[in-house]
């Protein structure tokens, strides 16, 4: 066995060891950073790579599209203000064909942009200027939600929930409509629906919903719950003038009114 002279007793990387290292690198979660500020791209690239992520950076929507075509991306960090097509338009375009997690970078205190971003499908937002550690925590939280955390892969196992012809598979993280269509849900929408079907006919406050879907990573931005509920309603009951599944309880929260079988 060859030893690394810089570290007593440590095998050098060669042969099978080199192959194992390459496999490990390939398995790293791949983050795509889209921001026209070169300093921010460099900062995030170094910081995220240091914390175990593979990182690709681009400066606009055109470059982003090429990167998405060329690589399997696990999460997109998308700046709101970009040259050419802006971040909101890009986010809307991605959501038309993909549920890939998206974290928006927005101007400090601009609630209107954050609300619109959440409405069109962003999974989270981070205001600028931001602390890289906060962004890292949110990246990890969104990835956990998109891949299935302990609440969906341990206690829930492979449960399938049925309600009025719909089937929600917690293991595959899939929602199948009564007509057999596979309904595209973002990570946040999926976790919200899981919270509802696990607590049917029970009023859930916004704080309870935040705790069930995001845990410690929840933010005090209550409007995000309302936006997420609105997005989920559009997918499971788009033609209903009056919601029949997710009902609003004034001054209390929401209740999932359908009967659920597990």
Image (cartoon, rainbow, N blue to C red):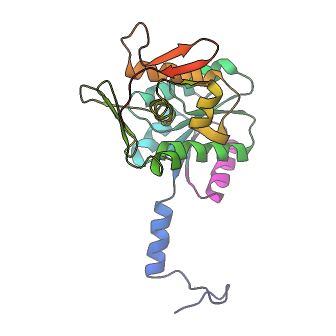
Vertical arrangement, residue 236 with respect to residue 142, above or below: above
Read off the magenta span.
34-55
Vertical arrangement, residue 41 with respect to residue 109, above or below: below
Percent of width and height locating residue 126: 67, 34
Residue at the (48%, 49%) spot, across then down? 155
Residue at the (74%, 24%) spot, across then down? 109
Percent of width and height locating residue 133: 72, 47
Residue 38 in sight from this viewpoint: no
Residue 148 in sight from this viewpoint: yes
Query: Dividing the picture into quarters, in which one does residue 134 lie?
Result: top right
Percent of width and height locating residue 222: 66, 23
Residue at the (50%, 27%) spot, across then down? 121
22 left or right of 166 in image:
right
Vertical arrangement, residue 52 with respect to residue 138, above or below: below
Percent of width and height locating residue 16: 43, 80
Q: Residue furthest left?
A: 179
**Foreground residue among 201 and 167:** 201
Q: Residue furthest top?
A: 241
Count of numbered tags: 0
Query: Dividing the picture into quarters, in which one does residue 68 lie?
Result: top left
């Amino acid at each position: 066995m060859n030893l690394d002279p810089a570290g007593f007793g440590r095998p050098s990387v060669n042969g099978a060891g080199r192959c194992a290292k390459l496999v490990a690198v390939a398995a790293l979660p791949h983050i795509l950073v889209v921001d026209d500020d070169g300093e921010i791209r460099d900062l995030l690239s170094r910081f995220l790579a240091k914390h175990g992520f593979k990182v690709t950076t681009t400066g606009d929507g055109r470059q982003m599209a090429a990167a998405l075509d060329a690589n399997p991306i696990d999460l997109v960090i998308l700046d709101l203000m970009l040259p050419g097509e802006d971040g909101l338009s890009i986010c809307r375009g991605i959501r038309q064909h993909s549920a890939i997690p998206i974290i928006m970078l927005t101007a400090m205190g601009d609630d209107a942009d954050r609300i619109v971003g959440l409405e069109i499908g962003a999974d989270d937002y981070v205001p600028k200027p931001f602390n890289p550690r906060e962004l890292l925590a949110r990246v990890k939280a969104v990835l956990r939600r998109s891949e299935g955390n302990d609440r969906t892969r341990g206690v829930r196992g492979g449960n399938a929930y049925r309600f009025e012809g719909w089937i929600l598979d917690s293991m595959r993280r899939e929602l199948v409509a009564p007509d057999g269509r596979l309904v595209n849900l973002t990570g946040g929408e999926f976790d919200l629906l899981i919270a509802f079907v696990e607590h049917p006919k029970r009023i859930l406050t916004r704080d309870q919903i935040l705790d069930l879907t995001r845990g410690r990573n929840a933010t005090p931005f209550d409007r995000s719950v309302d936006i997420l509920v609105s997005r989920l309603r559009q997918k499971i009951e788009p033609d209903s003038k009056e919601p029949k599944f997710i009902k609003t309880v004034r001054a209390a929260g929401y209740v999932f009114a359908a009967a659920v079988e597990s």
